[in-house]
Amino acid sequence: MNNNKIKLHGFNNLTKSLSFNIYDVNYAETPEQRQAYIEYIDEEYNAERLKQILTEVANIIEANVLSVSHQDYDPQGASVTVLIAENEVVDGTMDEISGETPGPLPETVVGHLDKSHLTVHTYPETHPDKGVSTFRVDIDVSTCGVISPLKALNYLIHSFDSDIVIMDYRVRGFTRDIYGQKHFKDHDIASIQSYLTEDTQERYKMIDVNVYQENIFHTKMMLNDLDLQNYLFSQKLEDISEEKQKEIYAQLENEMLEIFYGKNFN
């Protein structure tokens, strides 16, 4: 039996919100290649595909999908909003979430949710001169109840080509026990990194900025290795001179560092 249960007065209405930006960086040299990249991204991550991803997130946390709204935009981009809910805690007790552990990729996580939502928006864009193209995905997973949205984190990172990931996690509001005492969180957390699988942690450089007394956690991630061939759109590495390769590499590295640190270096 779990001795850490807290007897609640009503429903656990703590809100846990995970918001993050995922960036995929590419190099498309000519205007035709840049346009082709935008069209490729628009098709690869259209509203229907994004709906499938968010529906799988709902499955991972065993939530009931109440409604789905999705939209493709002209000239590019897409949005999806999913309202989710699950049964309330039947006996009025709250199980303390068992420590910091990595969430699954698409395995099962059990929880109780109410008044919750999943949203995703995409923003493909290209630089008009330098050939650098960036695809940004904004995702928000907000749950009310004992389940943590961090359990879906690994699945979402693996669902996109994630070169840079910037994440914010916050616990909002409070819930009361049967004695009227407020509880401002129902689980211990030191860092978002604790919820990432070991292989993900090894692939990325990571920085934390956390405000523990306010239950605010911020983590930035950037891939350690930049394999140039993986960043060329409609081009082959062997067709590019060594000098040009170095130039492209420097442009891509600079783009990623500027996004990661949130400032211009030029």
Image (cartoon, rainbow, N blue to C red):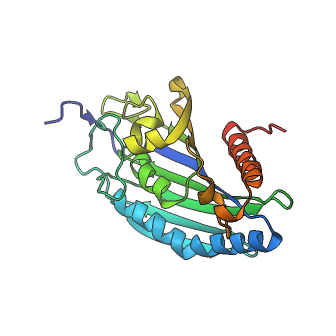
User: Which quadrant would the C terminus be assigned to in this image?
Assistant: top right
Q: Is residue 249 visible?
A: yes
Rendering coords of residue 56 (x, y %): 40, 65
Is 92 on the left or on the right of 84, as rendered? left
Residue at the image point whose x is 77% and y is 54% from the top: 244
Between 135 and 137, the residue placed more toward the observer is 135
Residue at the image point whose x is 45% and y is 36% from the top: 193
Is 38 on the left or on the right of 189, as rendered? right
Q: Is residue 34 above or below residue 215?
A: below
Between 122 and 163, the residue placed more toward the observer is 163
Rendering coords of residue 12 (x, y %): 37, 43
Q: Quadrant of residue 187?
A: top left
- Count of residue discs: 0
Q: Is residue 57 above or below residue 50?
A: above
User: Which quadrant would the N terminus be assigned to in this image?
Assistant: top left
Between 70 and 24, the residue placed more toward the observer is 24
Between 129 and 113, the residue placed more toward the observer is 129
Q: Is residue 174 visible?
A: no
Q: Is residue 222 above or below residue 28?
A: above
Is 197 on the left or on the right of 232, as rendered? left
Is 222 on the left or on the right of 11, as rendered? right
Q: Is residue 135 above or below residue 104?
A: below
Rendering coords of residue 235 (x, y %): 68, 67
Residue at the image point whose x is 54% and y is 35% from the top: 206
**Residue projecting furthest to the left:** 1
Rendering coords of residue 258 (x, y %): 73, 41
Q: Quadrant of residue 55?
A: bottom left
**Residue projecting furthest to the top:** 213
